[in-house]
Image: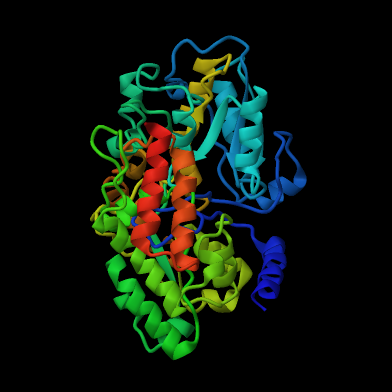
Amino acid sequence: MRKHRYIALTALFALVVSACSSSTPSPSSAPAASAPAASATTAASTEPSASAAAASPSAEVLAPDPAEAVIPGVEANAEISFWTFYLSPTFDQYIKDTIARFEATYPGVTVKWEDHQATFQADLNNAFAAGIAPDVINLSVSEGWVSDYATKGQLLGLNSTVPKAVQDIYFPGLWNEQLVKGENFQFPWYQGLNVELINKKIYEEGAGLNAADFPKNIEALPALCKTIKDKTGTVCDIRLTVNDLLSQMVYEGNVDVINDAGTAFTFDSKAGVDWLQMYVDMVAAGTVDNTVLTTNDDRVGLLLFSAGQAAFYATGPNLVRDVKSNNATLYDNLAMQPSPVGKSGVLGKGLMSISVNKSTKFPNASIALAQFFTNPRSMVQFSKQVAVYPSSPSAYDDPYFSAVPSAIEDSARPLAKDIISTYKDIVPTIPKKADVNQIVLKAIESALFNKVPAQQALTDAVAAANKLIQ
């Protein structure tokens, strides 16, 4: 029954999804993965097309400005490749116009752009293995991709290669997130606000709750989900950040996941066990959808919520446009509230970034492109097309951010600067992070679904993870 529901929803979603989504974060204080996303296409050429132009939101084409050329020593006649994640076809015209402005700003440099979607990480891993990875890469900070690839030595360090005046363009907390051995490997790109979209038909009419009183803290979620299940028969639509579970432990549970020396994992502490037990108890109570909780597909939860089958959904405000496209009736019954904060008390970390391949033949041109897409001018234009937010304080001087919004998806816009200015990555450097995360994921799933005690699951995972680094 559940399998048939998923197949039907997947078919529906493939036909209608067309707006940008910040992915389906867990109800964590760290906004999880993904992109302002688009449709299910897998690549986009830089050749303009009528269909792409029709799909892209209208936007002013900005004229080149010599002041945007802030990276010195760009290689003459450099040819660089750029991969993005889930941006085509909705934002084809924006990407192409920005590339054209970049090429005019740095004459002689040419850019080949591709957009990769559901297979992005597999495609990138294969490209790195084959020695043909792109020069410039759109990576998710919230899912831990930057630190994963940086730890493997595949990304270019930026602290010594980018002028200090350029580094200072960005919010310090965003520039200094996901450091590996003190080095930054990413230009902060578009940011999301962590919010709960609330289906008032289920949440208010069915469960008798008030959307304005949505919980402020993570610890209140189990009781909330029980109330919703008892009164409506609906389970909660929650997804763990499966690619970066140690990060989620830190933000939600205030867990010390590794010792100060970075030589031994410690996430089987009482704080770690308490964090995991909260989810184990929800699974045992039948109040969460198990098909969503640990799925690798961060859009399964979106399908359920967009189809009106969930009471709330943690994501970014930009996802409201997907809901509007998919289900106008649900859009008319939406409320939006800030997502609950974890025990760490930190609101969150960044969403998306742009990194440079360490092996690029054109490091300065590649740095220039990554910086250009993330500079204030480019980001203001992007923000005017979809509910994403710049990484630079000066971008918020544009009157667009102080204007009173009318649509629900834009209701958080005037607060964005104050919220994003607080973002920081509080997760320590994790050696062999991707391998450790897989150990942690298996342990967590054994506790959630196979009745292994939370303490045993995490202690066994710590022992296995320590073997990788000792």
Q: Is residue 72 left or right of residue 108?
A: left
Which corner quadrant holds the N terminus? bottom right
Residue 277 visible in the shown view: yes
Which corner quadrant holds the C terminus? top left
Residue 195, horizontal then vertical, whole percent: 39, 63
Q: Is residue 232 left or right of residue 397?
A: right
Residue 181, horizontal then vertical, whole percent: 33, 26
Quadrant hosting residue 131: top right
**Up-down: is 161 above or below 422?**
above
Q: Is residue 8 left or right of residue 302?
A: right
Camera-nearest residue between 348 and 291: 291
Camera-nearest residue between 43 and 127: 127
Residue 344, horizontal then vertical, whole percent: 24, 54
**Up-down: is 286 above or below 243?**
below
Camera-nearest residue between 87 and 259: 259
Q: Residue at x 67, y 75 (%)?
A: 5
Q: Residue at x 66, y 33 (%)?
A: 126
Residue 81, horizontal then vertical, whole percent: 63, 26
Quadrant hosting residue 186: top left
**Up-down: is 131 above or below 238?**
above
Quadrant hosting residue 270: bottom left
**Up-down: is 127 above or below 34?**
above
Residue 241 visible in the shown view: no
Q: Is residue 405 left or right of residue 114?
A: left
